[in-house]
Image: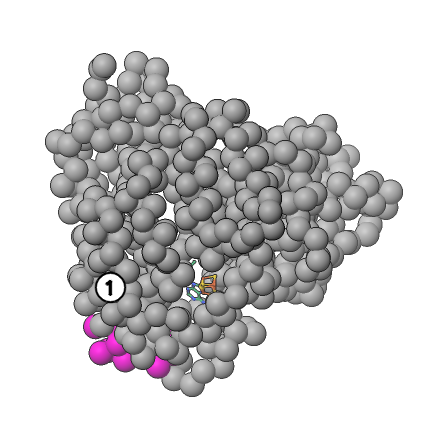
């Protein structure tokens, strides 16, 4: 069969989709360029905000038209949905998209081979699997290998924090960490097959507490130090971190490990202590600023990014002003911001004082204007500097390469075509909000 996978949402979903693609390739299937050319279409879905879930249903409607057109031409199409929406809205999928052949949550997609076998026997069944299995999905996945020079590696999944707005603990389940040796083995294999940069993934990655060979629990700092020993691995990153779980040794890694990039995504969510409390975050403004200060002491070059939610229930103008104030104080080099979205089943969805959509939109505009202007000034300050860039893919134009600086900035450079999958020094010549341009310095 030819397969087509469409991925929504976070980096973990990108990683999961890569693992699903590997399962399918091991079964002898190959990728299609378009959904219309695919016998198997899989949607890997995101449930973090309402918009993301709604988009799934409109996209599924469109995919059903393709299924109908293919049917008219005598071709069968299997449609599968995986990921967080399935875990939360399995009945809704069965009701609103009855043409879907199978749906599995983010923890059970390793069962796709048996599911496809069942469907081969009976084309009319619809299989829905929302198990939270006792065993780890990673024990059942085929060996990972590089898709290019930058790879994701999931080390931890799920979350026990239960921030009151967040659906993740209900869709990805409670927090589990992969054993140290298993992570190291996957990392070595990625490096052997071409990876130069590994981005460790987890919903709460710095809660990592995997067992080593002796059964002792090890933290993320230990894992980073072991990974940094791998020859051929040039860059390390990790995301997403929870401020209250940043420990001393993790901070020390930012001082000690040259391979660890000087960039940290450390979501603050809100700058108001009252709202942080209502969100059930285990940190306040001062604790957050203290962690930022210690990280800057460990590595003065470090840059920070964050996630923000505006319009959380009960957020006043003063609370919002506190968020703007924290943005100033920290001086983020990049950040993502969202309007609060009510997720059914989470505590905040039924909090009183829900904020009107209009106010959420106004606050988001103000916050984003500020964040974008800070991002633009950071990018502009880079002009004239020489930065090491890992070129991970070809750009749209002939001879153009796309890469990332240590700060995750997007960079395009015009080259003679050489340099793909290499880290090269680049003189920065131009900057916009979202990307840099530069010239590779000939060595
Ligand atoms: N509404 C808006 N944003 C949310 N996020 C998580 N849940 C919600 C929600 N209900 C944001 C948080 C998180 C990021 C991945 O998504 O900022 O860090
Ligand atoms: Fe959601 Fe909070 Fe866990 Fe992040 S830390 S995944 S926002 S519950």
Instruction: Name the image quarter holding residue 309.
Output: bottom left
- Across and down, in percent, residue 124 comes to 82, 50
- Across and down, in percent, residue 128 comes to 74, 57
Instruction: Name the image quarter holding residue 412.
Output: top left
- Across and down, in percent, residue 384 comes to 12, 31
Q: Is residue 301 magenta?
A: no
Frontmost residue, 257 versus 26: 257
Q: Residue at x 70, y 30 (%)?
A: 26
Q: Residue at x 34, y 35 (%)?
A: 259
Q: Is residue 317 magenta?
A: yes
Q: In the picture shown, does residue 85 fall above or below 148?
A: below
Q: For the magenta stretch, what is the residue range?
A: 312-321
Direction from residue 373 to residue 337 in the image, left or right: right
Quadrant location, the C terminus: top left
Question: Can you see residue 36?
Answer: no
Instruction: Name the image quarter holding residue 117.
Output: top right
- Across and down, in percent, residue 294 comes to 24, 56
Q: In the picture shown, does residue 393 fall above or below 377?
A: above
Q: In the picture shown, does residue 87 fall above or below 154?
A: below
Q: In the picture shown, does residue 408 fall above or below 93?
A: above
């Amino acid at each position: 069969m030819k397969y087509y996978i469409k991925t929504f949402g976070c980096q973990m979903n990108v990683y999961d989709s890569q693992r699903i693609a590997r399962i399918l390739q091991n079964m002898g299937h190959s990728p299609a360029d378009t959904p219309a050319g695919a016998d198997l279409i899989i949607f890997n879905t995101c449930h973090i905000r309402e918009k993301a879930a709604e988009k799934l249903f409109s996209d599924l409607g469109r995919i059903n038209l393709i299924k109908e057109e293919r049917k008219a031409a005598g071709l069968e199409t299997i449609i599968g949905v995986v990921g967080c929406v399935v875990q939360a809205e399995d009945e809704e999928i069965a009701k609103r998209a009855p043409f879907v052949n199978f749906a599995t949550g983010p923890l059970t997609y390793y069962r796709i081979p048996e599911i496809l076998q069942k469907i081969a026997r009976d084309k009319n069944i619809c299989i829905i699997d929302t198990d939270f299995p006792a065993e780890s999905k990673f024990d059942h996945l085929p060996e990972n290998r590089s898709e290019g020079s930058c790879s994701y590696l999931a080390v931890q999944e799920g979350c026990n924090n239960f921030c009151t707005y967040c659906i993740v603990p209900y869709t990805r389940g409670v927090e589990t960490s992969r054993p140290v040796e298993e992570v190291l083995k996957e990392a070595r294999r990625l490096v052997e097959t071409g990876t130069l940069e590994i981005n460790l993934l987890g919903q709460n990655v710095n809660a990592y507490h995997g067992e080593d060979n002796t059964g002792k629990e090890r933290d993320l700092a230990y894992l980073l130090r072991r990974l940094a020993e791998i020859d051929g691995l040039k860059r390390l990153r990790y995301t997403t971190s929870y401020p209250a779980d940043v420990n001393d040794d993790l901070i020390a890694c930012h001082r000690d490990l040259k391979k660890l990039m000087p960039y940290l995504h450390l979501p603050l969510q809100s700058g108001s202590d009252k709202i942080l409390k209502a969100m059930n975050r285990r940190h306040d403004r001062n604790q957050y600023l203290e962690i930022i200060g210690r990280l800057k002491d460990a590595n003065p070059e470090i840059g920070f990014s964050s996630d923000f939610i505006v319009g959380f229930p009960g957020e006043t103008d003063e609370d919002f002003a506190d968020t703007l104030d924290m943005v100033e104080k920290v001086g983020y080099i990049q950040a993502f911001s969202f309007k609060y979205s009510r997720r059914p089943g989470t505590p905040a969805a039924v909090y009183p004082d829900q904020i009107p959509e209009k106010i959420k939109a106004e606050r988001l505009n103000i916050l984003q204007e500020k964040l974008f202007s800070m991002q633009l000034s950071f990018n502009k300050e880079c002009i004239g500097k020489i930065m090491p860039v890992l070129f991970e893919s070809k750009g749209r134009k002939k001879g153009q390469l796309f890469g990332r600086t240590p700060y995750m900035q997007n960079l395009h450079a015009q080259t003679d075509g050489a340099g793909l999958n290499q880290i090269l020094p680049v003189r920065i010549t131009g900057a916009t909000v979202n990307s840099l341009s530069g010239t590779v310095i000939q060595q």
